[in-house]
Each structure stands twice: as structure tokens, then as C-alpha cells.
Image: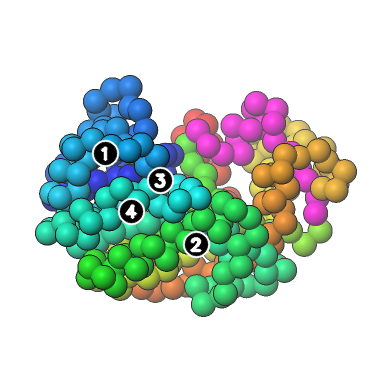
Amino acid sequence: MKLVIFGLGYTASFYGLYHARMFTEVTGTKRAPKSETLGRVRLLPFDGAAENVDPRVAAAVAEADALLVSAGPDESGDPALRRLAKEIASAPKLKKIIYLSTIGVYGDHGGEWIDETAQPKPSNLRSRQRLAAEAEWFALARASGKEVYVLRLSGIYGPDRNVLVKLREGTAKRLIKPGQVFNRIHVEDIAQAIDACFTGRAPGGVYNVTDDEPAPPQDVVTYAAELLGMEPPLERPFEETPLTPMQRSFYGENKRVSNRRMKALLDLDLAYPTYREGIGALVAEGE
């Protein structure tokens, strides 16, 4: 079986390198790869803004059994669909497509619990573009008969990308905004969810891929500092702390996101159900 991955970011690279074991061949795209391979992944150039598509990318899509889409959309929509919609729709062996999205499409829900039935109300351009790209993929599914899974991911962490790294670098903050919580998800559990979609019988649709415990961000920093034997950063009021517009936008959305559909239909047991197990494992692994 053959897998094509559009956009080898942190999560998609992790999946292609360390999971995807059912696939005998994995091809991934980058805008301008500096080598021909990344581990077991064959690299091909793909830029959705370019006029021409490398014919090897179109050939890989034509032979693919599955597609994993991680490349971010822009003001013109999803780059893979913009350049290769016909090839994807007509690929004879292609049955399942997974699109990696974000729980950011839900916007702010005042700290309430929500699930996949909640009305999306994205509050920034990035999330509006993601929601529009989701709709594009579902439209392709209806027209082509492909099974499309949209995985809405919460805050991603894992090896080399976590609060432990920030503490050691001195960039971790304990910002206090009363009532604020965030969901998180370890990259290993995202990979499990991707595998479950590709190998299981769950129907296509939207799945929240997130942990069990939405938690105040300052609690996560404090816990990680304790594990490292460090003093946590001083608490700082959110409103008095200089932040980038992107950082501030994250704190403008407050919700508790349920993962019940993921667990039930994908038959998934999280390896790291809360930040405590995830951060603890990273410390044990030497992070």
C-alpha cells in the first residue's frame, strides 16, 4: 500500500517516520526539499502557489491508496485541491483521505464543554481558512466517493516540542487568566488516531483529537517545572503581559473539547490521556 502526505510538518513527519507501518511506500511533499528522502519517506517538491506541479507528485497521487493532508490553506483555499483535485478524485486505488485541521475552528465557547456538533465560529483568519478547507475536502468526498476524515487537533506537543524545552530555554510563561483552559494532544496519540482511520471501519466525518483534561496553562508549566526540579516562572497577569497578536488570539478562545466520538468510533485508548502522563513520559525519555 502507498501513502502520500501533503505537507511534512511536525505531526505529519512524525506519522510518516514512526507510524504508517501498513504502508510499503510513503511519499511526502515539501515546498523545497533539500534531500530526496527523510528517513523512510520519499520527498517531492510541491508548492500550491506555483503554476506547475512536479509530475512525480501527480503520479504518486494516481498510485496512492491513502492520503494524509497537513499542508495549511491560504486565501485561495487548500493547495492540494487547488492543483490536484481532479487527480485526487480520479485516483483509482485511493479510498481514504485524512485532513488535519484544528479545534480553533470552534472559536470561543466561554469555557463550556463542546463536541463535534458545536457550531464552528472561528475568530481569526487562520481558523476560517481551515474551516473552508474542511468544506472543500467534504465536497470532494461527496463528488468522488472517497472517505474523508477531518481530525480537529488540539494543542500539539511531543518530542522536541513541549513545555520542558521552553522551561530550559527560559521562554516558558505562567500567564494567569482566570477560567482559561486549553486542551492538548501528544503527537503519538495523533498518530494513533490517524492509524485508526486508515485501518478501521469508522465512518468519515469530523473527529476531535484531544486529551481528556482541558487544563489551565499555568498548571502545566508548574507541573513540568516540578518534574525538572526547577522553580517555575513567576505568575504574570495575562492583561499586563506583552504578547504577539497570535499568542493573544489563543487566549481569546476558551473551551473544553470532548473526545468521546474519537474514543468510541475510532476505538482509541489514549497513551497520554492528560498532560501529566505526556510530560512525565517526555522527562523519562530524556527531554
| Residue wearing tag 3 | 71
Q: Is residue 179 left or right of residue 30?
A: right
Mark 3 and mark 4 residues within 8 Å of each other at the beta carbon: no
Of discs 3 and 4, which sits in the foreground? 4
Residue 152 visible to the viewer: no
Left or right of residue 35, residue 31 in this image: right
Looking at marks 1 and 3 on the same chain, the residue that comes earlier in the sequence is marked by 1
Q: Residue type at mark 4?
A: Leu
Task: Look at the image and give the residue range highlighted in magenta.
Answer: 160-177
Comes first in the chain, label 1 or label 2: 1
Amino acid tagged 2: Leu
Name the residue beneath numbered marker 2: 131
List the residue tagged with mark 1. 53
Q: Residue at x 26, y 32 (%)?
A: 43
**Secondary structure beneath label 1:** loop
* Mark 2 residue element: helix
Front residue of this view, candidates 87 and 270: 87
x, y (%) of residue 168? 64, 27
Regarding mark 4 in the picture, which secondary structure is present there?
helix
- Name the N-terminal-most of marks 3 and 4: 3
Q: Nearer the viewer, mark 2 or mark 4?
A: 4
Q: Which amino acid does the dot numbered 1 rest on?
A: Val
